[in-house]
Image: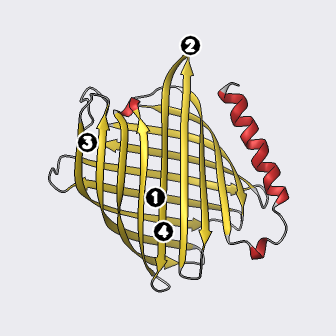
Amino acid sequence: MTIHRLMALLLALLVLAGSCFSQDENKRKWSDEAEFSFVDTAGNTDVLTLAFKNLFTYTFSEKINASWKIGALYGTSDGETNAESYFTDLRLNYNVSERFYVSIGGGWLKDEFAGFNSRYYLGPTAGYKILIGPRHFLNAEGGVDYVRENYVTDTQDSFAGGRAGGHYELAITETSKFTQQVTFMIDFENSDKYYVHSVTAIISALNNYLSLKGSYEVKFNNRPIPDTLEKTDTVLALALVVNIQ
């Protein structure tokens, strides 16, 4: 089965699942958001390809919730693979108050075209919700991660790093919104080693379960390994989003 047919099958299954779970939505403690994208990438990869992301969240109580995000990107050109990456991220949050929260999270990624055979990270986070609506939402957070990176050069590195980030959301209309997320991470022992990740998106709902999402993602690695790689990767994507809430 080709990657195109597999993505189409997954999309059909999720659309079917959305209709099956339409009952008793007020009682549901979990939600799921899946994205299927046509992607135009530039940087270390310059291809047309497909991508998939899925965000699953579960609410244990009024104060405790968890999220699990996974994603994959795969592309070929003239029968050869020239873009392939995978990631997963798991996070547990505790709402200390209406605005203040703490969390613990970790994840893994693999992106050989960006120099990583694997990258693992784990650490705590504290955050504050500066704006909580009804139109503007803004939160800022910071944390510390232990990171272990294995490179395509058969070398590796482990370090403790600081992390800071923020997420802004603007409700443009009842059915559309603008979002901006930025994350910065730096190696405590080597200030030349830092990463910046930015995602800008506009989302427009088609109905209760389907939305269109246009996004622009920037990944900046100030010290890629090997150093022949470009520092910046960009991803311009148009995605069909399936929501189950």
The type of residue carrying mark 3 is Asn
Residue extending farthest to the bottom is 97
Residue on which disc 1 sits: 181
Q: Secondary structure at mark 2?
A: loop
Q: Which residue is at 71% across, 57% downward?
A: 243
* 94 or 226, nearer to the observer: 94
The type of residue carrying mark 1 is Gln
Q: Secondary structure at mark 3?
A: loop
In x, y percent, where is residue 7? Answer: 69, 36
Q: Which residue is at 56% across, 66% downward?
A: 170
Give the mark, 2 or 4, whose residue is nearer the N terminus: 2
How far apart, in angstroms, are the residues tagged by discs 1 and 3?
19 Å
In x, y percent, where is residue 114? Answer: 37, 33
How far apart, in angstroms, are the residues tagged by discs 2 and 3?
31 Å
Mark 4 in CB contact with mark 1 (< 8 angstroms): no
How far apart, in angstroms, are the residues tagged by discs 2 and 4?
42 Å
Q: Determine crowd level at label 1: few under 14, some 14-19, many 20+ residues with C-alpha closer than 10 A.
A: some
Residue on which disc 3 sits: 222
Q: Nearer the viewer, mark 2 or mark 1?
A: 2
Q: Determine crowd level at label 4: few under 14, some 14-19, many 20+ residues with C-alpha closer than 10 A.
A: some
The type of residue carrying mark 2 is Asp
Q: Quadrant of the C terminus?
A: bottom right
Give the mark, 4 or 3, whose residue is nearer the N terminus: 4
Residue on which disc 4 sits: 92
